[in-house]
Image: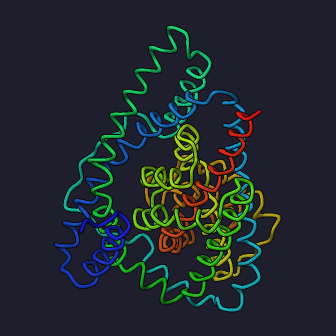
Amino acid sequence: MKLGLVPKIIIGIILGTLIGQYMPTEVCRLVVTLSGIFSNFLKFVIPMMILAYVTMGIADLTQGAGKLLLITALLAYGSTLVGGTFSFFVADNLFPSFISSNVTEQLSKVAGVTLEPFFSISIPPILDTISAVVLAFILGLSLSALKGKTIGDTLYGTVKDFSGIIDAVLTHAIIPFLPLYVCGTFVDMTKSGKTFVILGVLWKVFLVVIAMHFILLFVQFMVAGTIGHKNPFMLMKNQIAGYTTALGTQSSAATIPVNLECAKANGVSEQIRNFVIPLCANIHMCGSMITITACATAVCLMNQIPIHLGTVVPFIMTLGIAMVASPGAPGGSIMTALPFLWMIFGKQLGDPNGPICALMVALYITQDSFGTACNVSGDNAIAVVVDKVYKTWIEK
């Protein structure tokens, strides 16, 4: 019996945790080395994936391409802002009851600790993700306008062939090795001790953050189901594969191939899912924002740093833009957030290389999997809404 992707991802998580806990360091480093090589290959492919799918998705729209892009971007940014604000109110009211300042020393011991691979192979991407998104916008919008004319048909055929090549790469080289990537991620987290130390001290924070993710996802899918006239519980069921993959890879971009299949199961039209899913993987950060805001609130409480809504809202609004295209690698969101943490911690304590920020990174990385899974799951809720808007325009 052939295993599906979800069972393989789960097996990868379990194996990674067991190997990291019980196997010698050399074995762990070997797994991390192989996972790292695949990770670099994945980073090379992701910009081309974005370029192919977003371009084709926009090019195949029969009308309103520019408006649909604007609607998608506004929905993604709005969801990110709501997630961050919701997180602050919950954390500000609940965390003081179970966070004390004496946990800082314990957590700082694992901040920045990681398992080094034996070697790494650098595979620089041809484009970074931001460049790929912008180029895809230009090509897609131009093709949508020129389709039916000589230059439009020629370029359209070329991009379609390129998209077919990327499909083959994903099917035969990316998806089969995702469980290895997942396994290596959990080997590193377990062997370096970050997971168990942080969970042992701040497990209540961890549970509150995960609960906030699920609450937000429930609301998003209820709204999407209502607007799209679909069963929200079926939408959530269809998202299990995407959620599990993101849980293992800790990368929104790496989950794009699986998330596209989830969107297909939701009945989202091909052209909509081909541009909304890759686009939102780079701009929709509701889960990461929940995690970062909650972690920042927890760190402030540990160190008696005052925090209030007036400082948090500008931080959330800034980070919602700054984190665009950061989700390509595990922990990308928190690394992007480091230069802006001074907005909460102050100029002196907000040094990106200082102990407070190192503590933020350690605390965030432990919960990164769930934030990423929330991000990509919300992408499909947005796709259902955008697809409904598009089909309404077509009907009219």
Nearest the viewer among 226 and 330 is 226
322 shown above or below 300: above
Spot the residue most to the front.
395
Spot the residue most to the right.
310
84 relative to 336 in the view: left or right? right
Spot the residue most to the top.
150
Q: How many marks?
A: 0
Nearest the viewer among 157 and 365 is 157
223 shown above or below 394: below
Q: Residue at x 70, y 81 (%)?
A: 304
78 shown above or below 386: below
Q: Quadrant of residue 396?
A: top right
Spot occupied by residue 172 in the image (x, y as percentages of width and height): 26, 47
Q: Quadrant of residue 21?
A: bottom left
195 shown above or below 36: below
Spot occupied by residue 364 in the image (x, y as percentages of width and height): 53, 70
269 relative to 70 in the view: left or right? left
Spot occupied by residue 58 in the image (x, y as percentages of width and height): 58, 31
Nearest the viewer among 346 and 326 is 326
Quadrant location of the N terminus in the rendered image: bottom left
Q: Residue at x 51, y 73 (%)?
A: 367
Q: Residue at x 75, y 64 (%)?
A: 312
Spot occupied by residue 116 in the image (x, y as percentages of width and height): 27, 65
Colour mapping: rainbow
